[in-house]
Image (tube, rainbow, N blue to C red):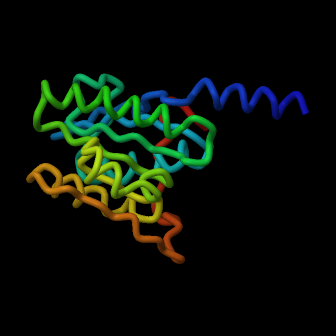
């Protein structure tokens, strides 16, 4: 029982942590910054996203100032997650005023649930991607860079990402 409590405590410490791929020696043409909030699956999904983006020559950074793309991987099940995400997105929107080409995206189940609000009503993000649509992220980023709002929250019964080797971020695992 004590082990479960420590694990939960460890997970809480990682909320909002910026991930970076270890030992990046490749020259990337763009960089993404990603934060994960919520359940353990979101942290694992961030590693899948990192792998997908790296294959498209997009590297990671832990410095938000060096990012061309900011992603938040979200969960709408965890207590207060939505509130934290909205606050963080408002901060990113301010950053975008200083760096107009910056692309901001929300991933995960909160993105799936609040897609209309995040893009159309609140105008907080450029990209909204559900957990079954991470493979389309490179194309959605490209669309957002041309000024389009990019959304893919389609659910899939078949998507497992089994053919993608997640990149372990921050020595996780």
Front one among 169 and 87: 87
Q: Quadrant of residue 28?
A: top left
Q: Which residue corresponds to the image point at 28% horizontal and 41% vertical from the top-left?
A: 124
| Extreme-right residue of the structure | 1
Horizontally, residue 37 falls left or right of residue 150, namely right
Above or below residue 147? Residue 67 is: above
- Quarter of the image for the N terminus: give it: top right
In this rendering, the count of numbered labels is 0
Residue 62: x and y in percent read 36, 25
Horizontally, residue 141 falls left or right of residue 54, namely left
Q: Which residue corresponds to the image point at 22% horizontal and 26% vertical from the top-left?
A: 94
Q: Quadrant of residue 71?
A: top left
- Quarter of the image for the C terminus: give it: top right
Q: Which residue corresponds to the image point at 16% horizontal and 40% vertical from the top-left?
A: 29
Above or below residue 139? Residue 118 is: above
Front one among 47 and 25: 47
Residue 52: x and y in percent read 35, 54
Residue 91: x and y in percent read 31, 26
Front one among 113 and 61: 113
Above or below residue 64? Residue 34 is: below
| Extreme-bottom residue of the structure | 157
Above or below residue 161? Residue 172 is: above
Q: Which residue corresponds to the image point at 25% horizontal and 45% vertical from the top-left?
A: 123
Residue 136: x and y in percent read 31, 63
């Amino acid at each position: 029982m004590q082990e479960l409590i420590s694990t939960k405590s460890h997970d809480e410490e990682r909320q909002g942590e910026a991930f970076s791929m270890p030992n990046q020696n490749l020259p990337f043409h763009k960089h993404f910054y990603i934060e994960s909030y919520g359940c353990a699956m979101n942290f694992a999904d961030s590693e899948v996203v990192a792998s997908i983006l790296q294959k498209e020559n997009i590297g990671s950074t832990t410095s938000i100032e060096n990012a061309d793309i900011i992603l938040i991987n979200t969960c709408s099940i965890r207590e207060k997650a939505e509130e934290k995400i909205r606050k963080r997105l408002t901060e990113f929107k301010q950053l975008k005023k200083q760096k107009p080409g910056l692309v901001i995206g929300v991933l995960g189940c909160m993105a799936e649930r609040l897609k209309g609000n995040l893009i159309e009503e609140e105008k907080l993000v450029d990209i909204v991607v559900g957990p079954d649509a991470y493979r389309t992220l490179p194309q959605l980023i490209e669309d957002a860079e041309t000024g389009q709002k990019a959304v893919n929250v389609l659910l899939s019964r078949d998507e497992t990402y089994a053919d993608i080797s997640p990149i372990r971020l921050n020595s996780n695992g």
